[in-house]
Structures are given as C-alpha cells and as structure tokens.
Amino acid sequence: MGLILIAGFTIGIMGSFHCIGMCGPLALSLPLNGLGNKIYAALLYNFGRVISYSLLGLLFGAIGQSVSLFGWQQILSIVIGVLIIVLMLLPKKVMNLLMISKAGNTFFYKIRQWLSEMLSKKQRSSLLAIGLLNGLLPCGLVYLAIAGSVATGSIIKSGLFMASFGFGTLPVMLGLMLMGNRISLSFRRKLKYVYPVFMILMASVLIVRGLDLNIPYLSPHLEVMAGKVHSCCHKP
C-alpha cells in the first residue's frame, strides 16, 4: 500500500510542473486577495481538486478491480502503457479527436459553464466547488494518473493512488497561487515541453510493470486475484 501512495505522490509532484502551464491561468485568476486568509483560500481550491481526483480513482478503480479478478491485470497495464505512448506520438489535433467524444464535449462544456458561474461569485465558499469542477476538466496528466490507478487492480488502492496524486500536485500549485505572477509566462510555457517526456516515461514504467519481471518495486510479481468458485453441493 505504501508503494502505491509513493507512486501516486511522485506522479503528482513531478507532473505538477505541467500544471503550472496548463492550469496556472485558472489558479491565478482566483480572487484570493479579497477572500480573507490567502493560504486558507488556496487550500480550499486545491482540496477540491484532490477530492475530485479521489472520486475518479474510486470510479475507475472498479474497472481495474473487475479486470484483475479475471487475471488480466498485467495485460491491462501493458495496454494502457502502449496506448499512452501512441497518443503522445500522434499529432495533437488527432489526439484531441480521439480523446474527447461528442458526449464528452457536452459534459466538459457544462463543467466550464459552472466554473464561470462560480468564478463570477468571488466568494470563499465557491473555491471548493471551483476545485471540484477543475478536477473534472480534461487533462493528460490526470489521465495518466487514472491509468496508473486502474493498474492497481483495486477500488480502494485506486482511490488512494489518486488522492496521493492530488496531494503531490498541491505544493507546486499552492506555491504558484501564493507567488502569483512572479513565475513568468515564458517559464510556464517551457514546462509544457517536459510533459510528453514525462508521460512516455511513466507509460514505459506501466509496460515494464505489466511484464511481471519479478523486479522489486519496478516490476514486482503480480498475484492473480481471480477467486476460486467453491461448490456448495458435495457429492456423496
């Protein structure tokens, strides 16, 4: 369990530099100065994101647990890793078409509408809701974390993985919100180039993990979780 928490936190803290470039504009647009204690207000927003990530982990963890019960956990880990690499190598326009369906576009459009309404209120009570909604917006880094959580093969472990991922993003995002525009726009844009490399690296780890090479921590032996069916009737 400890390794799962460390893995989720590591993805969060390393990938959070990508958040500066992608989610930074929204975080910097929050009216923290007019809402009392600035640190408390920033924490409300970020805890909202962590809650959303945790709920997503529980949701997708159900899929991972179902797959694991059939003994396909290794195959799932490899398939997810390969899929991430393929998506990273595709042109951005093609990737966007594949990732977001028409139903998805409608859902995310509604989320953005609610975000706009919450931002217009400029109230501390809305910061938690803004964080919750922001955690549901499309983000490649979150998708990577979800892929890792699904590979755990457990609902609870998946939820904890995503929670630790969320807390991993917190230090950098909190620092960004408190420092404001002291972090230059050009620097935030440069961080975007690190993102594909990080995604491919983590996808490679998922593939190696699925190969069941019996390497401690990196590719440990995965026990098949498929349960045995016991008959309730006994022949004499």
Image: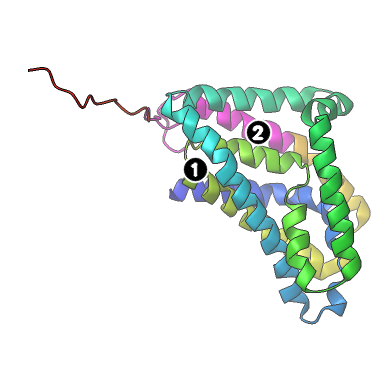
Determine crowd level at label 2: few under 14, some 14-19, many 20+ residues with C-alpha closer than 10 A. Answer: few
**Residue type of the residue flagged with mark 1:** Ile
Question: How far apart in space, not on screen, are marks 2 and 1 (Cα)?
Answer: 25 Å
**Which one is in front, 107 or 143?**
107
Name the residue at 82% across, 68% down.
Answer: 179
Say which of 65 and 7 sits in front. 65
- Please name the residue shown 33% across and 29% down the image: 227
Q: Which residue is mark 1?
A: 155
Residue 74 x %, y %: 48, 25
- In which quarter of the view is residue 138 placed? top right
Q: Is residue 13 magenta?
A: no
| Residue 200 locus on image (x, y percent) | 69, 31
Task: Sort mark 1 into few (<14), some (14-19) or many (20+) by Cα contacts within 10 Å.
Answer: many
Instruction: Kindly identify the residue that appears in the image at 61 percent across and 27 percent down.
Output: 80
Whether 198 is among the magenta residues is: yes
Give the residue number, with chain letter if any, for mark 2: 201
Residue positioned most to the bottom:
36
Which residue ends up furthest to the left in the rendered image? 236
Q: Earlier in the sequence, mark 2 or mark 1?
A: 1
Q: Quadrant of the C terminus?
A: top left
Stretch of the chain drawn in magenta: 197-224
Q: Horizontal and vertical percent for residue 215?
A: 42, 31
Q: Secondary structure at mark 2?
A: helix
Q: Are marks 2 and 1 in contact (CB under 8 Å)?
A: no
Q: Amino acid at mark 2?
A: Leu
Does residue 105 appear left or right of residue 149 in this picture? right
The answer to whether residue 198 is above or below residue 228 is below
Q: Is residue 228 above or below residue 7?
A: above
Quarter assignment of residue 35: bottom right
**Scheme of colours in the image:** rainbow
